[in-house]
Amino acid sequence: MTTSTAALATPVPSANHKPVAVVDWVAFTVKLRNASHGGHLKRKYEDIGVSHAKPLDAGPGSAAHAFRIVLQHPDKHRVIQDLLADLERSHGLSEAPTLDALEVAVDFWPTGSDLGAGAELTKRLMMELTPPVLNNPRLVDDAPPAYLPTGADIDTCRTLYVGNDNEDLMWRVYWKRTDETFVGDDSKRHPKDLPEAEWRARAEVRLQGDALASLSLMTPMDLASFKFERLYSCGYFKFCHHATGSGVVASNPFALYAAQRLGVDQEAPACMLGKFGLKDSRGRKLELSRNLLTDVELSEACRSALRGLSRRF
């Protein structure tokens, strides 16, 4: 492990990083009165961030009435409103659009020229992410793509995932040095290198299905009044560090064996330790492993950033 647990538990110097929350992308389904083509819609609206317009009911000539629209980086809800208004004028909407998926990220932008500080913070975010849904936490190597054991070393060439593409919630934590945009009609993404001044530590969560419904986000218009700090209240942007001197498990040898099978050790990411520690010795559900302590500074920084997104959006 290149970064010690003690180092990861030290406070983030506020002068070195500025947390900013953004809507990374939003996906919704529209049903048009007058048929169109996905390529035409993408070209028409790509200047405002539409990266994909997938036809859902293509007929003769590939014309369709229903499309899944993916809009990248909308900085204000007005972008969504203007897009839907123009679709109403040009093609007509036969039904109210439905919200399919939403990805929200908190970026920690460096305020100085120390790239190493951003890398170290990325490792800390990976180590401390503690989502309420703990499914398949794993590290993924950037080159070549490969799944690594859960106990593998954390470094900035890897991405921490929790959850899967087909689930209602999925998290990623990584050092953002590239930007990806959808191209063509095959949904494939191609990375574009970012200048070093735009490299930042990022934690993001993608919501769909019941996760959106639980927040009463049914249509893209519901985002207009949404309080993004609710994502913090739901536990989606909370972080914990290992309690100093704590053992990972009790002295029970069977518990120790189970923990090792999960790749859990003193320097495992908090989400993996949390996955093991969801019940006590009597089988009672625990809200948080006794070996974890809330990282108040990092968690509060995310809540403040999400509150700022509510004001801007």
Image: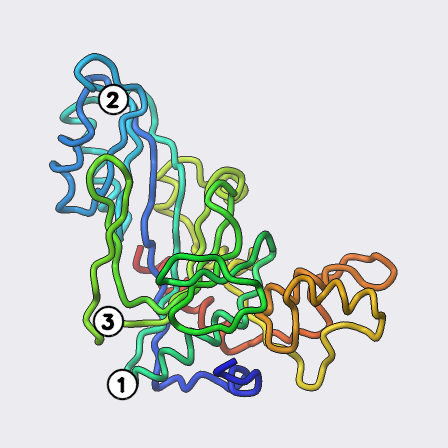
Query: x, y (%) of residue 60?
Result: 20, 12
Callout 3 environment at 10 Å: few (<14), some (14 to 19), or many (20+)? few
**In whole angstroms, how far apart are the C-alphas of marks 2 and 1?**
48 Å
Q: What number is the disc on residue 198? A: 3
Foreground residue, 298 or 86?
298
Rendering quarter of residue 84: top left
- For marks 2 and 1, the one nearer the N-term is 2
Q: Is mark 3 on a helix, strand or loop?
A: helix
Q: Residue furthest top?
A: 60
Residue denoted by label 2: 32
Cβ–Cβ below 8 Å for labels 3 and 2? no
Question: Residue flagged by tag 3: what amino acid is it?
Answer: Glu
When the figure is inspected, residue 18 is found, relative to residue 169, above or below; the finding is below
Query: x, y (%) of residue 158?
Result: 42, 66
**In whole angstroms, how far apart are the C-alphas of marks 3 and 2?**
38 Å
Residue denoted by label 1: 112
When the figure is inspected, residue 73 is found, relative to residue 298, above or below; the finding is above
Q: What element carries label 1?
A: loop
Q: Which of marks 2 and 1 is in front?
A: 1
Cβ–Cβ below 8 Å for labels 3 and 1? no
